[in-house]
Image: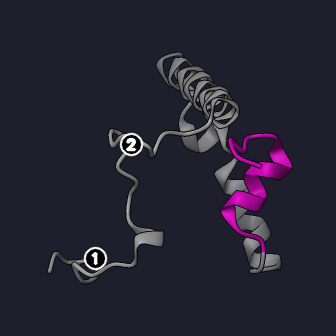
Amino acid sequence: MLAGYGSLRTPAAVRPADHGAPGRRLPARSRSAALCFAEAIRDTERHQAEQIRAGLSLRSQLRFDRYLALRQQAPAPTFRDHLRAIGGAIEK
């Protein structure tokens, strides 16, 4: 057993999909949505990388200090909640 990967008898529902197997491809509508999602991630990460090259740290871009201050007041919000609030979340 590999550390952190559970047993080799992992239920199929949580195993990675075999995207190369015939009959297990996404429907066209799902492929289109997945491609749009992947492009949004790519674009966001490219923009972040450009900002880093320009001297603005990722920590600053994501307003991490603000997140830590908010966590002192109310520990419930997650980092993902913070990213949504500042418009930095990739997924909805």
Residue 73: x %, y % from top left: 82, 78
Helix, strand or loop at disc 2? loop
Residue 47: say if magenta. Answer: no
If the image is split into quadrants, where does the N terminus sit?
bottom left
Left or right: where 60 falls relative to 54: right
Q: Residue at 37% of width from left, 40% of height from top?
A: 22
* Residue 80, above or below 92: below
Question: Which amino acid, mark 1?
Answer: Gly
Q: Magenta residues?
A: 77-92
Q: Residue at 28% of width from left, 76% of height from top?
A: 4
Instruction: List the residue tagged with mark 1.
Output: 4
Left or right: where 51 falls relative to 87: left
Residue 82: x %, y % from top left: 76, 57
Q: How is the image coloured?
A: one colour
Q: Nearer the viewer, residue 24 or 82?
A: 24
Label pair 2/1, CB-CB below 8 angstroms: no
Q: Residue at 55% of width from left, 38% of height from top?
A: 58
At label 2, counting other C-alpha atoms closer than 10 Å, the crowd grade (few under 14, some 14-19, many 20 or more) is: few
Left or right: where 87 falls relative to 37: right
* Quarter holding residue 10: bottom left
Q: Nearer the viewer, mark 2 or mark 1?
A: 2
Q: Which mark is residue 19?
A: 2
Q: Nearer the viewer, residue 36 or 78?
A: 36
Left or right: where 71 falls relative to 51: right
